[in-house]
Amino acid sequence: MASGLGDINWTLRKAPRIAWFLASQALLRSLDQKMARQPREVELADAVEREAPHGDVDAVLATMDAFSRRRRWLMSMGPDKGAVVTAAMQDPSIRNVLEIGTYCGYSALLVARHLSRRGGRLVTLEISRRNSAVARRVIAHAGLEEVAEVRNEVLAKSIDAFHAPFDLILLDHWKGEYLTDIKRLESAALLRPGTVVIADNVGFFRVPDYLDYVRHGGHYDSRYVSGTVEYNPQLPDGVEISTYRGWRGAAIR
């Protein structure tokens, strides 16, 4: 997830649930430091490399799920909402995929395992240097490093490097950037008619500007799929699945 003063201001104005989430994450980091523990993401990568057979994607995902449920909570997408991504990847025409918000690489694995069978490619962007390194380790252990490229970048800094429209886009980064980044992609002609955009956490974190745009802006056919917050069945959440119709807007860079 991205951060910065602009994000903090957006959080305080628009999304008190994100403020709560950030406070909880800060508490977890503080407890880790006081207990002299490794960051939970690094500990996850160690567990994956130790416990899952190399090249076994199912085993890597299962290890990540077990780690998050039984050891230390992680904000990976998880199998509940991950099923939405897996269903979308059944379309054999999806070959060029962009993910914004890699975290530890869970959803990247869900995508890359299908792309590997059809000669496709995933570029996944992660703002955290540490999490980028963790995701590379996880993806490499799953044997998918030739398919999924992890970049320690944000979209605004990397968009000029993309030259072909994406077939599928996953949004799972800072929620206040969802609308801005989808407009950036539109303006750069990186969406084509039929591009599928999956936005995670829109049920829990409440992103009304983004949802209003994809539901009522006239450029997408959009629907909501309910689920729960990562590894927490008591907290309702969901993803928005939007199919691009085609449109050109003002440039946002």
Image (cartoon, helix red, strand yellow):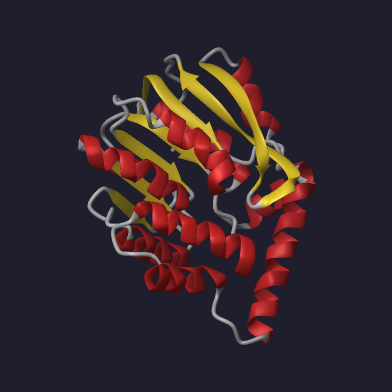
- Relative image position of residue 152 (x, y in whole percent): 39, 59
State the image quarter where residue 121 is shown.
top left
- Identify the residue shown where x is 32% and y is 44%: 113
Nearer-the-camera pick, 114 or 130: 114
Q: Position of residue 36 (x, y in %)?
A: 61, 87
Total marks placed: 0
Q: Which residue is at a point 52% across and 23% down the rendered structure image?
A: 242
Q: Quadrant of the N terminus?
A: bottom right
Which quarter of the figure has residue 218? Answer: top right
Q: Residue at x 78, y 44 (%)?
A: 13
Position of 189 relative to 53 (above/below): above
**Camera-nearest residue between 115 and 130:** 115
Tell me if 182 is positioned left or right of 234 in this view: left
Extreme residue in the left direction = 119
User: In front here: 191 or 142?
Assistant: 142
| Drawn side of residue 58 relative to residue 114, left or right | right
Q: Residue at x 37, y 28 (%)?
A: 90
Quadrant of the rendered image containing residue 225? top right
